[in-house]
Each structure stands twice: as structure tokens, then as C-alpha cells.
Image (tube, rainbow, N blue to C red):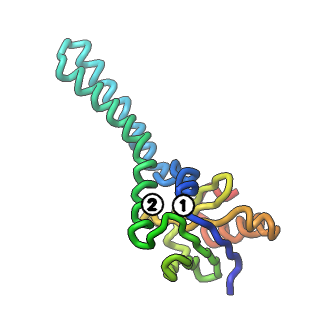
Amino acid sequence: MEQFETKYIINQATYKELKWHLISTQDWISGALRIPFFVIIAVLGFEFRIVAILLAGIFLTAFLIIEILLVPKRVAQVNLQRAQESTGTTDLEVLTSFTNDGVKTFNFSTNGTATFNYNNFIRFAETKNMYILFTKASQFVVVNKKTLAQEGKTKEFRQFIRSKLPKIKGVA
């Protein structure tokens, strides 16, 4: 029996809204922690007047910053291309159902169903229009906030998610 059920159109606007959540916090931190290292390389190159090291440090720093800014956009583009290839459209209507046993998604474009056990989810994010649950393999499930709000189930949904995923952060 479904506890919660929402429909959502996953399209370019969806990816634009969630793109900064596509990369895990751990990956963001990992990238950001490398920047000072590359800056130190550039400073050492400048200090010891070794042009190759200076240029390498500057290049690596610039490359990492650009990568940090572009990776979420690229991930979104790849997902949209995959949707286009497999369904012929980039507007995927998905029904997400939460039961006591797991989460089931039904894609109306492909008539395909996917089922996820709660132990596969490792991240929770929230945007203006949706909640997103991410799996270990970086798949995600979108929950329509507006539908939950209209049904008066927002608080109940959050409590349900906290009970099923007690280790996930971000579910207030």
C-alpha cells in the first residue's frame, strides 16, 4: 500500500533546478580541498622563479575551478541526452510511490518501473519544487513538493523519510 505518491515531469527545467545537488557534498569538498594545493604549487613556482611550476599551478587551479562549475551542468546534459535516446523525449513523466518496503517509480514514457530499497538511499536534497533522494549509484527519485503540500502531507512525508532513513541528513 502506498504511503505517498506524487507525479513529476523530469525535464530540462528539473535538471536546472537540481543540478547543484547532482554532485555529492563529499565530491564538492574533495574538489575544493585540492584548490589550495594547486595554489601552493603556483606560489612555489613564483617564489623560486620556476616558470613551469608556476604555470602548472595556475593551470591546475583554473582547471579545477572550471571543472567544479561545469560538472553539474554536464551531468544534467548527459541525463537529458539519455532520456532523449531511450524515450524520444526529454519530458519524462514519473510517478513516485513510497511504501513501507521501498520506493517505486513508474516512467509513463517507457512504461518502465524501478523499485528501490530504502537502504540504497544515501542523500536527501530539497529545492524550491522538489525533494530528491539519491542512491549510492547516483540515481535519484524526485518527489513533487506541491502535491504533498496540497494534500497536507509535507510534515508526514518528512517524518516517514526520517523513520525509513534515519542516517540521512537534511530531512528537517
Left or right placement of residue 157 versus residue 82 in this view: right
Task: Please tell me which residue is depicted at 58% across the width and 77% down the height of the picture.
Answer: 103
| Callout 2 secondary element | helix
Sort mark 2 into few (<14), some (14-19) or many (20+) by Cα contacts within 10 Å. many
Q: Please indicate whether residue 76 sits to the left or right of residue 158 in the image.
A: left
Residue 19 drawn at (x, y percent): 51, 51
Above or below residue 84? Residue 78 is above
Q: Quadrant of residue 146?
A: bottom right
Q: Mark 1 and mark 2 in contact? Answer it, CB < 8 Å.
A: yes
Provide the residue designation for mark 1: 11
What amino acid does circle 1 point to?
A: Asn
Q: The residue tagged with tag 1: helix, strand or loop? A: loop
Sort mark 1 into few (<14), some (14-19) or many (20+) by Cα contacts within 10 Å.
some
Nearest to N terminus: mark 1 or mark 2? 1
In the depicted view, which residue is nearer to us: 147 or 58?
Answer: 147
Which kind of residue does numbered mark 2 sit on? Leu
Where does the image place residue 101, in percent across and percent down from the top left? 59, 83
| 26 lies above or below 43 | below
Tell me where residue 137 sits by quadrant: bottom left
Q: Residue at x 74, y 67 (%)?
A: 147
Q: CA distance from mark 1 to mark 2?
A: 7 Å
Q: Which label belongs to residue 62?
A: none
Say which quadrant the N terminus sits in: bottom right
Q: Check the picture and name the quadrant holding the C terminus.
A: bottom right
Q: Residue at x 48, y 79 (%)?
A: 110
> Measuring 63% from the left and 61% from the top, which residue is drawn there?
131
Instruction: Name the residue beneath numbered marker 2.
Output: 80
- For residue 127, above or below residue 99: above
Residue 23, percent across and down? 46, 52
Residue 96, given in percent of the width and then of the height, sits at 61, 74
